[in-house]
């Protein structure tokens, strides 16, 4: 009985080998390919809002008074980036201007390193009055532009 069982096992194994090789023998061709994807460089700037400058030192309207203010914004990118800020002097619309400087995280620009970036940053402005008669009293404004460029 054990011999008969062993013979059936051998026959079954031979059948699997035979039919398995038949399946492979019926396959006429095969080819492989690589699937690729190229992700473009992208960045997004968000959370930037208007902000007002307030008196930092001096007496409001006096010569040499300094006004400052800031706002936070987020930059998210999938590559290293350079972040810059541009803006004009504050102006009142009738020709009077106030000397104004702008900084990003206390510097002129920001350069990220590594592959991706996701961080909060600060933009600040500082305006310094000239002589008392160098600028009219009233409201002043300027537009700033923060630019994110791939490195």
Image (tube, rainbow, N blue to C red):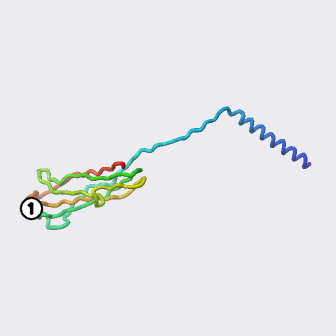
Badge 1 crowding class, 10 Å Cα cut-off, few under 14, some 14 to 19, many 20 or more, is few
Residue that appears at 14% across and 54% down: 97
Q: Spot the residue most to the bottom.
A: 58
Residue 22 sits in quarter: top right
Q: Residue at x 40, y 50 (%)?
A: 79
Q: Is residue 30 above or below residue 130?
A: above
Looking at the image, the residue that sits furthest to the right is: 1
Q: Name the residue at 13% across, 57% down.
A: 138
Tag count in the figure?
1
Q: Which residue is mark 1?
A: 132
- Location of residue 26 (image quadrant): top right
Residue 80 position in % (x across, y down): 39, 52
Q: Is residue 135 left or right of residue 54?
A: left
Position of residue 29 measured from the top left corner of the image (x, y, whole percent): 65, 33
x and y percentages locating residue 60 in the rendered image: 14, 65
Q: Secondary structure at mark 1?
A: helix
In this rendering, would 109 be left or right of 88?
Answer: right
Q: Is residue 45 left or right of residue 64?
A: right
Q: Residue at x 27, y 56 (%)?
A: 108
Task: Find the residue positioned furthest to the left.
Answer: 133
Q: Nearer the viewer, residue 84 or 129?
A: 84
Name the one closer to the observer, 132 or 141: 132
Task: Tell me if 142 is positioned left or right of 14 in this view.
Answer: left
- Residue 147 coordinates in the image, percent (x, y): 30, 50
């Amino acid at each position: 009985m054990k011999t008969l069982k062993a013979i059936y096992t051998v026959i079954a194994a031979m059948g699997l080998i035979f039919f398995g090789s038949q399946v492979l023998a019926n396959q006429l061709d095969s080819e492989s390919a690589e699937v690729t994807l190229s992700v473009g460089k992208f960045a997004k700037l968000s959370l930037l809002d208007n902000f007002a400058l307030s008196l930092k030192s001096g007496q409001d309207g006096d010569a040499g008074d300094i006004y400052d203010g800031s706002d936070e914004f987020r930059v998210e990118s999938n590559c290293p980036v350079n972040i810059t800020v541009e803006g004009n002097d504050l102006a009142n619309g009738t020709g009077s201007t106030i000397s104004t400087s702008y900084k990003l995280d206390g510097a002129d620009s920001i350069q990220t390193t590594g592959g991706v970036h996701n961080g909060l940053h600060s933009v600040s402005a500082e305006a310094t009055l000239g002589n008392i008669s160098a600028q009219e009293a009233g409201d002043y404004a300027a537009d700033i532009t923060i630019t994110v460029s791939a490195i």
